[in-house]
Amino acid sequence: MNILEFNEVSKVYGQDKAGIHNVSFSIQKGELIALAGPSGSGKTTALNIAAGLDDFSLGEVKLLEQSLKYLNSDEVLELRRGQVGFIFQSYNLFPVLTVLENVEYPLALKGMKRNERLQKAKEWIKEVGLQGLEHRKPAELSGGQQQRVAVARAMVTEPKIVFADEPTANLDAATAEMLLQLFQRLNEINGTTFIFSSHDPRVIKFADRVITLTDGKVVGPDDLN
């Protein structure tokens, strides 16, 4: 089953931001995929469109077998809730909330009872190696620690598919390796699909398959010579 499909998708921006042009690919349930390419290649744009965070100009995108083209913003939000996780390069944590509150927030949106969501949030905080920091706020954490909070928040709902924009960019080698192993374990145990936007060789080597973009277009080995 294809969990994500791009059919001749284009997104046009102004001159200062990369778009994508006639991009087509499909991703099956359970794959670990890297969207690779240099800065300005359009990989983050493709990732945001795939996750329903950005619109597109032409073509069709199917996420979880539903065409985003025909869904309004509320319907896209409902589709993503509990089924899609997103790890932002800029973390996107709530600065006034603690680590625990940031991680439990998606579960609160789902209506989970407070005791249950606190327990689950604590489990994921431990999973990413941040136990003991539950009551700190983002400003009291390092960049790498903030990234791990973002990972825990994305994973706490046990989504079917996770989009991650440069997930290892702010991490030291040991933490990056720990997170990649965590992603692989979740993929093997839960069948979670992961799509990474990255130029990190560690992530590209880790992926089952690499989709390379250059100048907003998907390219193959022959195009890179």
Image (cartoon, helix red, strand yellow):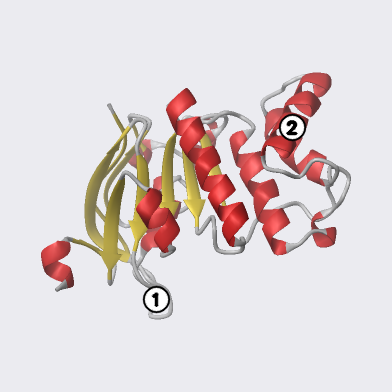
Q: Position of residue 38 (x, y in %)?
A: 36, 72
Please tell me how crowded label 1 is: few (under 14), some (14-19), or many (20+) other residues with Cα within 10 Å: few
* Residue at numbered disc 2: 121
State which quadrant residue 112 falls in. Answer: top right
Give the farthest residue toward the bottom: 15
Which mark lies nearer to you, 2 or 1?
Answer: 2
Residue at 70% from the left image edge and 63% from the top image edge: 143
Residue at 43% from the left image edge and 41% from the top image edge: 194
**Quarter of the image where the C terminus is located:** bottom left
Residue at 56% from the left image edge and 32% from the top image edge: 81
Q: Amino acid at mark 1?
A: Gly
Residue 7 seen in this snapshot: no
Element type at marker 1? loop
141 vs 41: above or below? above
Disc 2 and disc 1: Cα gap in Å?
40 Å
* Residue at numbered disc 1: 14
Element type at marker 2? helix
Q: Nearer the viewer, residue 188 or 13?
A: 188
Q: Position of residue 100 (x, y in %)?
A: 80, 39
Q: Nearer the viewer, residue 51 or 78?
A: 51
Q: Earlier in the sequence, mark 2 or mark 1?
A: 1
